[in-house]
Amino acid sequence: MSLFNIGQAAKASGISAKMIRHYESVGLLAATSRTFSGYRQYSEKDIHTLSFIRHSRDLGFSIKQIEKLLSMWQDPHRPSSKVKELASAHVEALNQKIQSLMLIKSELQRLVHCCHGDDRPECPILDQLALNQESHV
């Protein structure tokens, strides 16, 4: 079994060492082992868990949602109906995000194809994004 130090785990999973420590502190990840000097070591399973967390966070899932799914999945006595229910909710949320992204993609493609010089076609999504940016400044 391959073991990774925290730097290698961070590189392999795309999550910073600081966030790996945070995920350990909130119980989403437990280092597989420690060296004699106390340094954490991570297994390939830990790397997969970290990658799952990163992708879930990128898709907008909360730490609580991820924690619930991981703890339920890791429970040897998990009721399959509960896992199925939770996974179905995640799939539905992903489908909604995908639909939103597809709409944004089509609007951006339309914008790319019809922008010539100073022409500014109507694009409600970009108008809303611009308003959001202005409100954050």
Image (cartoon, rainbow, N blue to C red):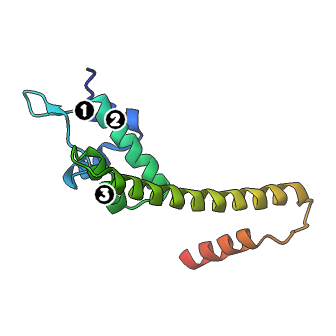
Q: Amino acid at mark 3?
A: Lys
**Mark 1: few, some, or many residues within 10 Å (few <14, many ≥20)?**
many
Which residue is depicted at the point 68% across and 74% down?
128
Q: Are marks 1 and 2 in contact (CB under 8 Å)?
A: yes
Report whether 44 appears left or right of 98. Answer: left
Residue with the mark numbered 3:
68
The secondary structure type at the circle numbered 3 is helix
**Which mark is nearer the camera, 1 or 3?**
3
Q: How many angstroms separate mark 3 from mark 2 (CA)?
A: 19 Å
Q: Secondary structure at mark 2?
A: helix
Contact (Cβ within 8 Å) of mark 3 with mark 2: no
Residue 30: name its quadrant: top left
Label 1 amino acid? Answer: Tyr
**What's the residue type where badge 2 is placed?**
Ile
Of the numbered discs 1 and 2, the one sitting upstream in the chain is 1
State the mark number for residue 99.
Answer: none
Given this view, does label 3 or label 2 mark the residue nearer the observer?
A: 3
Q: For mark 2, what is the residue?
A: 47
Q: Which residue is the site of mark 1?
A: 42
Rounded to the nearest angstrom, the CA distance separating label 1 from label 2 is 7 Å
Choose the circle earlier in sequence order: 3 or 2. Answer: 2
Residue 126, placed above or below residue 42: below
